Image: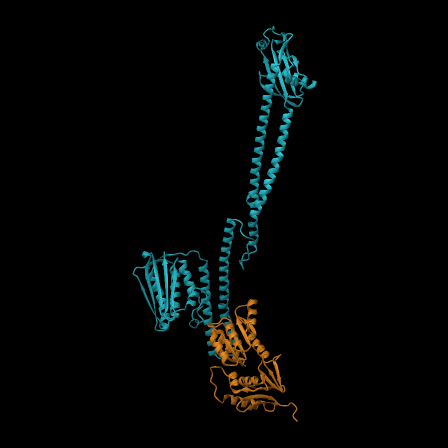
Chain colours: A orange, B cyan
Amino acid sequence: MKVLVVEDNTLLGKSVKRGLEEVGWTVDLALDGDEGLYCAESCDYDVIVLDWMLPKRSGFELLKELRVKGRNTPTIMLTAKSAVTDRVECLDRGADDYLVKPFEFVELVARLNAIYRRSIGQGTSTMILGTLAFDLAGQQVTVNGRHLELTGKEYDLLAALAAKSGQLLKRNTLVGILYQLDSEPESNSLDVLLARVRRKLAGSGVEVATIRGKGFVLRVADPLPR
Amino acid sequence: MWKRLPLSQKLILPLIAMQLAAVAFGVIWITSRLQASRIKELEQMLDSETDAIEDALVISDERVVFNLKSETVRELYSNRNFYFSLTGADGTTLEESRGPSLETRAALRTLLASQHQQDEQVVGIDVGGTPWRVVRERLSLKTLAKMTPELALPRNAQSVFLNVATNAGPTMTELRLVRRYMVVGAVLLVSLISFGTSIIVSHTTSNLRAMAHSLRNVKPQNPVWTPPGRPQCAEELLLFESFRSMLSAIKKSTDAQRLFIADASHELKTPVAGMLTTLQVMLAKRRSPEEYEQMGRDLLNAVQGLRRLSGTLLDLARLENQAEIETSILNVEDLLATVSDRWVPVAERKGVVLTFANAPGLMVHGNRELLEVAVGNFIDNAIKYSDSGDSVEITAVASHGGKGMILHIDDHGVGMNERDLSHLGEVFFRSDEARSDDMSYGLGFAQAQRIVGLLGGHVEVKSKLGHGTEIIVTICS
């Protein structure tokens, strides 16, 4: 799962980034509104964590710009303002959720999970796909109830494909989801990752198909093979 | 008690009292004048009637008797309210008119006999509860002789008194009636005037009352006042306007305070959120000593930043509440030397050159500690908005004929645009966010400006984007 954190307080930004990375997310950190907008426009994030008061461009200006451009990335607002009117304003102006500073980190993670879950149309934190069961909060996958050992990146790849199962995902989109904006992954790292995931999925009835020259698609095989 | 009375009553009560006094005085004066004139009239009548009776005296059969030939005298002779008689020196009645009743005549006779009065003096007597006016006249024999020179002196004319009395009862009754009418009229008049006065006064003061009530509804959180109506007089207008301007000043101040609190809460909550998250992330799993050290250092920085912020906020709050501060004569050279010791190392770390210059022997009236903070804040900003290799010049010159000082702090850094210039001085305002790290809160300029203001000076800022900023601090004792 890929998240953009836009926060001007370096300590808070850094710690949120570190904490989210440690629970297995891919995080980009932007320190002001302009940088945040640039990031949000140049990459598909699953969720955006957005501070309200930002230098250069406020969180709301950023959000408005994004929404105008048709990007409906789920956004959770961070604000020091705790009045009801402020919280209502947050939601009214396009945020999907808000957290009042200072907040509990576990709550941020839980809310990010929930908001992400909703955005992919899942009611609970468990997503069933054929024989696979995804625990979105715990970032775990089981095959027929048996735990599937996955690294963070492997999970991200599988989850990204599963969230849009049956749909074509372009190579660039997947790279964007899996790697930070400023990192430069090696050209074949996605293929290496895919190979590992395919190996681990062998026999589960779920397969990652390659559409040559276009991208990849996750398919669930017929549960009752003839 | 008097002080607690409503204004309307304070106005109405004395007004009514004065009206009552004036009317009562008027009634008493008019009735007494009326009474005096009526009695005088009565006495004049009595005089002329006495003359008429005197003229009608004749001597017959050696006795002085009334000649009833004159119609006037005849009429008087039988008038119920009129009495005249002739009495001898011993008080015996010789002749008397027949008008009044027997009882009255008897009473009059008795009274006249006991009366010792001077000649021709009118006196009042009480006859069975009715007031009468009486005049007694001694008839000299010579006068009588003149009237009838051919006759011998009458026997009863040794010493004869003519008594004439008139009943003053009807006049007094009339006067009493007039007085009663006047009192009733006066009471009605006073009531009417009081009623009118009350209406006018309470109408005049009603706006004040309504205003006082409506002011009670003004809440400190939202000091907006809707006047109960239009002002009805110059004083009310003045009061309305004074309240309005006072409330708008309060509103301005509470708005500023609210903004300040909102800003301060953001500035305080964000680093706290940072520290909280850092600690929670730090404790979420076991880490290497290097990681702990790194996070600890980040936390330390944040705590130090918070300490600075809270300290500055408290200083600022103290400055806001300080009406006057202790001042003394300061040597500007010493002051700048201290400031230079503090800030040159900071500037050097950034590669900025600070140069200090001052007029020799320059003195200024101020508070050393506060001035060091203020000048330090200006220099801090100048360094912050300058780049490596830039210079900042601090120059102090005398002003106001040696009584004051003008301090220039000129940098050649990024400068500010018009918009930023207009926001300068607002708490938590930062001109160029990119240059303000987590350690700068946009408080320095505001604090310095308040200090200079407290010392009776003012700060002028000239700035041009890309060319630098010039701060001109004028302090005059």
The count of marks equals 0
Residue B438 falls left or right of residue A203: left
Which residue corresponds to the image point at 41% horizontal and 69% vertical from the top-left?
B417
Tell me: residue B39, above or below residue A58.
Answer: above
Where is residue B194? Give x, y as percent.
Answer: 59, 41
Q: Residue furthest left?
A: B360
Q: Residue at x 63, y 33 (%)?
A: B181
| Residue A105 visible in the current orientation | no
Quadrant of the rendering where the C terminus of chain A is positioned:
bottom right
The location of residue B78, given as percent across then percent down, is 67, 18
Residue farthest toward the bottom in the current orientation of the protein: A226
Which residue of the protein is positioned furthest toward the right in this rendering? Answer: B102
Vertical order, B322 against A203 (above or below): above
Of residues B212 and B234, the one nearer the viewer is B234
The image position of residue B338, as x and y in percent, is 35, 64
Please provide percent x and percent y for residue B377: 40, 65
Residue drawn at (50%, 73%) of the image: A61
Figure quadrant of residue B402: bottom left
- Where is B137 relative to B358, above or below? above
The image quadrant where one finds the N terminus of chain A is: bottom right
Whether residue B265 is visible to the viewer of this picture, yes or no, is yes
Q: Is residue B363 left or right of residue A197?
A: left
